Amino acid sequence: MTQAQAKYLKDYQAPLFTIETIDLAFNLAGNETQVQAISRIKRTSKHTHALVLDGEDLTVVSLTVDGEAVPYHVSAGQLVLETALDEFELNIITKLDPEANSSLEGLYMSDGAYCTQCEAEGFRRITYFLDRPDVLAKYTVRIEADSAAFPFLLSNGNLIDQGELEGGRHYVCWQDPFPKPAYLFALVAGDFDLLQDEFITRSRRKVILQVFVDKGNLHKAHHAMASLKKSMAWDESRFDLEYDLDIYMIVAVDFFNMGAMENKGLNIFNTKYVLADTLTATDEDYHGIESVVGHEYFHNWTGNRVTCRDWFQLSLKEGLTVFRDQEFSSDLGSRAVNRIHAIKVIKNQQFAEDSGPMSHPIRPESVIEMNNFYTVTVYNKGAEVIRMMHTLLGEEKFQAGMKLYFKRHDGQAVTCDDFVAAMEDASGVDLTQFRLWYSQAGTPIVTAMDSFDALTGVYQLTLKQSLANCASPLHIPFSIELLDAKGHSLVNEVLDFTQAEQVFSFEGLSHKPVASLLQNFSAPVKLQYRFNVDQLVHLMRFASSEVARWEASVTLVSQAIWQNVASLQQQQAMTLDPRVRDSFKGVLLDTELDPALIAEILAIPTASALIEQTESVDLDALALAREFVLTEMASHSEDELIVLYRSLVPVDSTQARALKNQCLTWLARVPDEAEALVIAQFDKASNMTDSLGALTAANVGDLPCRDELMTAFELRWQDTPLVMDKWFMLQATHNAQDVIERLRQLQQHKRFSMSNPNRVRALVGSFAAGNIYQFHRQDGKGYAFLTECLMILNKLNPQVAARMVTPLIQFHKFDLGRQTLIKACLGQLLALPDLSKDMYEKVSKALAK
Ligand code: B3K
Ligand code: ZN
């Protein structure tokens, strides 16, 4: 298969030609759409190679060089042109069919509007070009379309011309003064409602802000607009970075493969990350919008002004921008809760990726399909690597590093090494050893052992690190706190852990302290330390860091669950240590703690999260043990839960709602009380957080009212796609024996469509990733259902298919029976005659492992 060729970082070569300007003219006309591209091309050095342009699914209408027709050759995604000229103008007209483009890459249609997605390699579906991030060109774009159907014609940069044409058509011209790689190009044509505002930058420049949404949704665009203004102000105050164009546009579309895209001056967003009002969006949705709007805005500097030399460097922009958006959310909201969310992503998803067949360093070394590498490793572990540098340097030196990075590289396409060099040079901190984090795949294991000498008063902490396929140790910032018996903090510092084994001594102590280790998850490693129940209870009460308190609670309850798994395997009765339930009751009664933090502590690790703590899992025993521990804890605290729940009902705050809904989910395990509370909350709910909180409790507890509430919800929201996604998601995550039959019926639901990624993720994706017991049924029906869906998606939308295959390729922790069933499904996929290279890369790696 020619399409399954891997590319290697080590083979990188600078471009043989460069394109300094490109004039694009789009004639939007359904399947007769034409694109003219006039590019000014230059040879970059003395060589005699042909010009090789990338292009896919295009029909060439005409091609000239400096106005003359010349011979060229088109094959396998390339157009080859022999020429002796060092500088010339290439004029290509191509024809394409946006209506038939279901991959949602390149130019496609979303609900009657034209839109584009070019990252990573989608521009080659629009015209033949040097579609690589180190070719930066200045773009001028003319768009022509029917005036009535497409009143708004948008592209990057500033509007320079517009006018009416014959036959009810019109045109608009845009010019982007900043040279950019092709992946940042964007075009939108459609009819929208427009929310407009402005932002005055700190150098007193006025920027027009526009949010375009589907007709009738204007009232749902305000939160996105407010988030944009907050992002612009925050980037000025925290990073000293100002916006650079006169206009910033966001367009929301319902057909979109991911969250959003940072195209220069014209972000295209999934509606999920724009539209919100309290009736239809949860507090979590509001938070997601703020964070994604921020993320895309922050890319304007980290990604757009300074971009990536090649796609192996993706973490240069993504890790850094995730770090920036996490800091944004933390500065605006609760730092602890945001940190907990980020830690969960690493522990539950990134660790899984690291131990599975798609394991790769944050800077991958080989890639078959680039779209497969927009991963939790590149993004979220990438952000952890930036965060570790921030920890090692401190805010001031880190910001000095950022300044130097922009000073050196503004307008360039650079590498992760360039970034680290700027941090190093500006701070004087030696990052030689630290660089290993960029090239090592896998999760390091840090084992901690400690001892106390009562005679000398010395406490010794021994740390050992190990990582498969890694000969030399990593530079790990290891944050600790030592607490005395009364809970006073004795030591609170970051250890520089740089050797394979290292001993840290602390003098002058009267008793053995309780250690909070790897505070704030100061490095993305797995910590191994034998905490006993008393130590964990102590940390839950006294650790200075809220994150450390949460962390201790996770360890405490996880240990209790694993002990019961062992009991079940030894045919012994399950039990729960009273200290465990009492410590959770203590948290419920703690009036000092932030309710949002209590809610996090009550969010007991999911089965998937627990699986990530072990090497192999007895899923059936785990299900029983987890259920047992939760039910024990809930019944033990029933009265306190009800009192707390009732006290929170009248409180109108995000934190209170989070805790209230967590209480309700716990109460759903002791159904006597829950049924009435759930119905009352559902009936009275004045916002989506509360409606969904009630439904989630009914779903988790499989309460008698569940089906009736689900039907009422469906009737009310059937015309609101994003809310229906929540309903589909609840259906898909219902742990019921007949769920797969129900999902098959729901695929015929009038609001479901296999060609819309949001619907597919809601129904199919959340089943595979979120309904662990039904997906991993012993009869294999869960795997078969996902496989059927993937076969359809493989043709319709390879990117979405390849994302959703993840739960199937991470099979190595399950028992042999399940592994055999999964491998058979993967075998079926691999045998597909038209398997996309996206799917091929993941499935073949899984089967080879
Ligand atoms: N840069 C885009 C992601 C593009 C994904 C291409 N498959 C969104 C973001 O990270 O901001
Ligand atoms: Zn990004």
Image: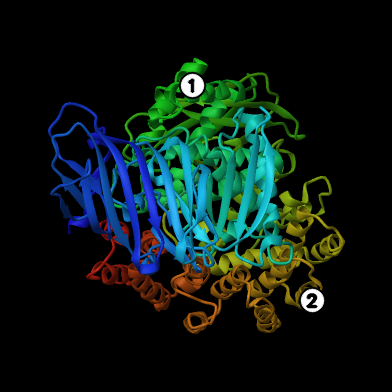
Image position of 437 (left or right of 597): left
Front-lying residue, 275 or 23: 23
Q: Measured from the top left, where is residue 830 in percent x and y?
A: 25, 66
Q: Give the tally of numbered discs.
A: 2
Q: Measured from the top left, where is residue 90 in percent x and y?
A: 25, 43
Upstream in the sequence, badge 1 or badge 2? 1
Q: Quadrant of the N terminus?
A: bottom left
Front-lying residue, 675 or 275: 275
Image position of 612 (left or right of 98): right
* Residue 728 at least partly seen: yes
Element type where label 2 sits in the image = helix
The residue type indicated by label 2 comes to Asp
The residue type indicated by label 1 comes to Lys
Q: Which residue is mark 1?
A: 407
Q: Can you say whether 244 is above or below 583 in the image?
A: above
Q: Can you say whether 729 is above or below 712 in the image?
A: above
Element type where label 1 sits in the image = helix
Q: Which residue is mark 2?
A: 683
Disc 1 from disc 2: Cα separation: 57 Å
